[in-house]
């Protein structure tokens, strides 16, 4: 399916549930089968890091690398909107004006939001990857590869910014817990990240 066709099939922003105290309390701390990812996972995503809305790092304390629209069909054709986990790696271009540190270009754990971000009323579907690592500088225009290994939760709307931040922090913990199992850790060395 072409990117244009994929974009045409998901133009309307769907209604999503609002996060409740009950849904917050009942969240699992580990997701995904113990034996490892099951179809449709793993899903490979890649592309040049795009400028997003600028609110991830500033407003939510969770900077994201935004994937281009061309990367979305790989996810949107086989999954639902929501939060996912896996690994990601940043690749600097040959003509990069700034060097990333050695630890910045390793395969690192990530969480990813795929959806419309209803709290912010986005007008289009986006894939926003948060790599769980403190980068010394931004990497717009650098190349990003992400290997999505599982699903954490559906997309929700929020009554407050604080409730959204609380869920983001829980998402990060769930991702790290889920990735710490041997059947998931092995994907850090996946050949997808070597090319």
Image (cartoon, rainbow, N blue to C red):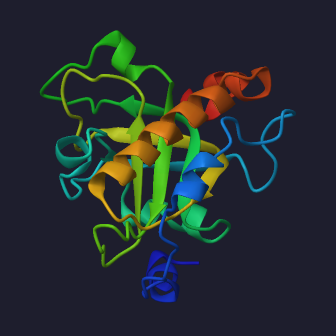
Furthest-front residue in this view: 21
- Tell me which residue sits at (20%, 33%) in the image: 138
Q: From the viewer's side, name the closer residue of 16 and 8.
A: 16
Depth check, front residue: 37 or 45: 37
* Direction from residue 115 to residue 23 in the image, left or right: right
Instruction: Classify 184 as above or below 81.
Output: above
Q: Residue at x 52, y 56 (%)?
A: 21
Task: Please tell me in which quadrant of the rendered image residue 195 appears.
Answer: top right
Q: Is residue 66 visible?
A: no
In-image side of 160 versus 90 (left or right): left
Number of numbered discs overlaid on the protein picture: 0
Q: Is residue 19 above or below residue 46?
A: below
On the rendered structure, is 20 left or right of 148? left
Q: Residue at x 39, y 66 (%)?
A: 69
Residue 94: x percent and y percent? 26, 29
Front residue (pair 122, 23): 23
Instruction: Note whether 119 is above or below 91 in the view shown.
Output: below
Residue 172 drawn at (x, y percent): 49, 35
Say which quadrant the N terminus sits in: bottom right
Q: Position of residue 140 (x, y in %)?
A: 22, 42
Q: Can residue 100 be seen in this snapshot?
A: yes
Q: Residue at x 35, y 20 (%)?
A: 104
């Amino acid at each position: 399916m072409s990117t244009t066709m994929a974009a045409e099939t998901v133009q309307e922003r769907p209604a999503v549930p609002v996060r409740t105290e009950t849904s917050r309390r009942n969240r699992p701390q580990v997701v995904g089968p113990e034996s490892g990812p099951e179809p449709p996972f793993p899903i490979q995503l890649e592309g040049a890091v795009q400028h997003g809305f600028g609110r991830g790092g500033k407003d939510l304390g969770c900077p994201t690398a935004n994937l281009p629209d061309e990367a979305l069909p790989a996810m949107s054709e086989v999954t639902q909107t929501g939060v996912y986990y896996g690994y990601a790696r940043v690749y600097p271009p040959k003509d990069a004006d700034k060097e990333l540190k050695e630890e910045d270009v390793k395969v690192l754990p990530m969480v990813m939001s795929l959806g419309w971000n209803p709290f912010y009323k986005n007008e289009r579907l986006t894939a926003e990857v948060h790599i769980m690592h403190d980068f010394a500088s931004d990497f717009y225009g650098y190349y990003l590869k992400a290997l999505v290994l599982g699903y954490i939760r559906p997309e929700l709307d929020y009554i407050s910014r604080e409730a959204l931040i609380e869920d983001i922090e829980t998402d990060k913990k769930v991702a790290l817990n889920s990735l710490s199992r041997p059947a998931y850790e092995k994907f850090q060395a996946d050949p997808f990240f070597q090319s």
